[in-house]
Image (tube, grey):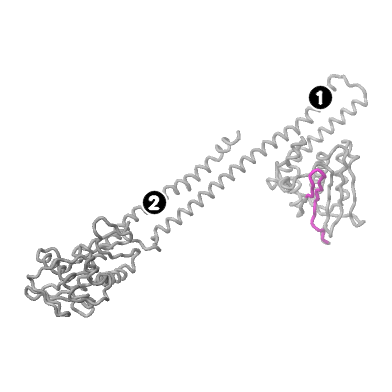
Amino acid sequence: MREFPEILRRNRALIILFTVMVILPSMLLGLLGLRTIRSESAQQQFQQKQRQRQIARFLETDLKGWLFSRQPDGAIAHSLLRFTIDGSYVVFPDFQIVIPPERYTAPVPFASSKRALHDKDPINEWDAPLDARMIEDLYYPRIQAFLRDQDLGKNLGAQYFLRLKALIVQFPGTSSGYVLGSSRLVEYAKRRLDELTAPENFRGIFSITAPAGTAEPALSGAEVVTLDDFAFFRVAFTNKESGSFSLQRTIFLYSIVLMTLVMALGVVFMYRAVSHEMAASQLKADFVSAVSHEFRTPLSSMLALLERLESGRVSEGDMLGRYHQTLRQEAHRLGALIEKLLDFAQIEEGKRKFSFERLDLAEVTAEAASLFQGSGFAEHLEQIDCGPGTPTYVVADRTAIVQCVQNLIENALKYSPPGSPVSVRFGQRAGTPFVEVRDQGIGIPGREQQKIFEKFYRAENARSFNVHGTGIGLALVKRIMEAHGGSVAVQTTPGKGSCFCLLFGKLGEGDV
């Protein structure tokens, strides 16, 4: 975590660019879109209210035309009762009843009228036949009240009586009128509202003014419009269940979802980039530490030997020879390490040039094994020819292939217990030349078997066993084999050993 601020500092340009190009525009576009949606919603609500009031006016005009029409399709065709004002008399022509003006009849309470009519309720049962007593007790008193209110200017030719559940209408400029049941009125108004609101995203509910102190659940929370000329009629508008989004709102919602996904992907990308940078930084730090240790160990040994030689404390010939041999080995070790680093750098940059020739794998493996002569490991190495009895040839760069085999042998010796045998096999399998290095060492966990071929990577168990290395040996082997058209494979079991195999391309008849 100590490298995290430094990684952020190195990637600040990318972070700033992502913030300026993605996060800030997304936030600004989201705010503008939200403001646009709110403005559009307010405008749509205003336009919807205007449209609802317009539909209420249309309904009011239709009701007037229907109620005051004498045509067969007018409301009079559905009337319960017709009457005529003849001077001071009220005449009911359908029943041949004439009631003089001097006769005032107070409205009979509905409960009393029910009992008088043997518990029949003509108010709710319009199919029940009307008779003279019902007309005189129920309708005539309301018609009188209607005529008085009309003389006082309290109605414009139509008045609804809640308890009667009927509308009393008088044709303008005439003495004729009729009584219309509320069911017919509501039926007509509902049909016209359905026609008027069919293309809209709301529906209309026609109702008659309820008595004071009561509420109609169907109208709760709805936009209610009262008809100007029919103060006892109301129209409530509610949104249809299906509803609909405007195109702009739909586009905005999809844009928000898309921007959210882009931001999420950007965050994931940034997280992966920073994580990769941190991992690479850690690998490089481990590599520098490993290389420093690889250099420091032979240098320390060489300096100690040189100090003893300069002091003159070593005079015996045998001891001097051993010192010189050790110095030579350590010098070769440093040279090999430097050569490995230079080769890896050249391959990474694509500058490594290979000199291909026809090679005998027996000679290649022998040359690689000879480099360990005098190191104390030679007696643990075993070369096994698995060929068909004839030499196995490949076309490759001798130095590069020897370096690959040497790296595999060195790893096998380092990661195996002291005295554990290491075998080097070569030959052909199904016509494919191969070189195989097998050990009985610590093995490699399954989750790390592919990562070990990445540069600077070292397996966890290698670090836990305190085995030193640079982390570029297997990466170098993989890149060399790929440059030769081959590959490197591994079979391993933790705690039982590993087997690394170099697979070459088949040698054709025309290959030199």
> Which residue is nearer to you in this view: 352 or 497?
497
- Is any atom of residue 311 visible in this view? yes
Give the amino acid at mark 2: Leu
The residue identified by callout 1 is 304
- What is the number of the mark on residue 263? none
Quarter location, residue 303: top right
Quarter location, residue 126: bottom left
- Name the image quarter holding the C terminus: bottom right
Image point 78% across, 29% down: which residue?
Answer: 299
Give the amino acid at mark 1: Ala
User: How far across and down, in percent of the image, does residue 194 sit?
Assistant: 32, 69
Quarter location, residue 207: bottom left
The residue identified by callout 2 is 34
Q: Is residue 13 left or right of residue 410?
A: left
Q: Is residue 297 above or below residue 407?
A: above
- Label 1 CA crowd tier, 10 Å (few <14, some 14–19, many 20+): few
Label 2: element kind = helix
First in sequence: mark 1 or mark 2?
2
Q: Is residue 285 magenta?
A: no
Q: Is residue 320 left or right of residue 189?
A: right
Label 1: element kind = helix
Foreground tag (1 vs 2): 2
> Which residue is nearer to you in this view: 83 or 52?
83
User: How far across and down, in percent of the image, does residue 240 sit?
Assistant: 37, 63
Q: Is residue 68 left or right of residue 330?
A: left
Q: Is residue 280 above or below residue 185?
A: above
Q: Which residues are magenta?
A: 490-508
Number of numbered tags placed on the structure image:
2
- Label 2 CA crowd tier, 10 Å (few <14, some 14–19, many 20+): some
What whole-number distance in Å separates the C-alpha atoms at marks 1 and 2? 77 Å
Image point 12% across, 64% down: which residue?
Answer: 149
- Name the image quarter holding the N terminus: top right
